[in-house]
Image: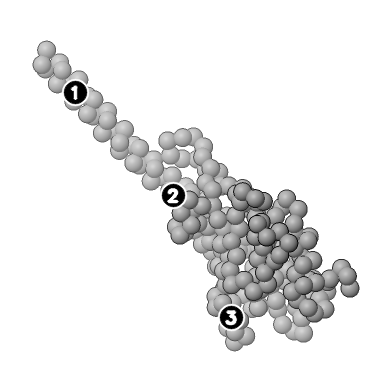
Amino acid sequence: MIGFTLSKLNLLILVTATFAIVAYFMFGITDVVVSNSAQQTVSTYAEKAASIVGSDSLCFKTEVTVPAHLSYFGGIQTSKRFFYFMNIARFPEDYDPDYLTSVIFSISDRKNPDKLIAASRIDVNAEVLFYDWEPSEVNTIKGDAKAIILDPQSAIMRKDSLIIIKEVLEGKNFLHIITCSSAGTCEANQQKVACNILGRESSCLPCPED
């Protein structure tokens, strides 16, 4: 009887240990899968921005919308969603015509914004200008932002889109990046930049009132 009980106890210990090892391994796999998915996402948008700057056109504009979440497979469950912030920064912060400007796309965990999951950098021969907008301030847009953050899960209105504009003015390259929402603020935000911030003639960003 004691031998039977001990054999069952050993079997239980073996099953528990096996489950713990498998669970630990699968959670590790989950981190790798999420990181790979995030890396593919930031690389895609960085390459898109690079292709815009590298175009031969004197004026080129595109609008991109990031997904609401990153879907991935792995871990204990068959399918999960990863909620994130997309951060876009430039280096150096202040434009120096003697050097290329780095534009850095990165993804961080929405639950832990300081935890970077993936990043991708492009170097451009252009002055990079950020125009930031916050859903809580729908009628304003800032033209002096040093960096911008997209939040596709914002509770007020999703901040999930970018207007990316390459402009050549008097022989100098500019890269304008305007944040907005796919819910319907992109055209309005572009007009605010054109009319209220730039204050100069622009074939790429004309003010409708002109």
Residue 55 in sight: no
| Residue pointed to by mark 2 | 32
Q: Nearer the viewer, residue 189 or 37?
A: 189
- Residue 31: x percent and y percent? 43, 48
Identity, as a three-letter code, of the amino acid under mark 1? Leu
* Number of the front mark, 1 or 2: 1
Residue denoted by label 3: 94
Mark sitting on residue 9: 1
Per the image, label 1 sits on a secondary structure element best described as helix
How far is mark 1 from mark 2, CA to CA? Answer: 35 Å
- Foreground of the two, 80 or 140: 140
Measured in 3D between alpha carbons, the distance from the residue under mark 2 to the one under mark 3, in whole angstroms, is: 35 Å
Q: Is residue 168 left or right of residue 115?
A: right
Q: Are marks 1 and 2 in contact (CB under 8 Å)?
A: no
Instruction: Return the disc, 1 or 2, that comes first in the chain's sequence.
Output: 1
The alpha-carbon separation of the residues under discs 1 and 3 comes to 67 Å
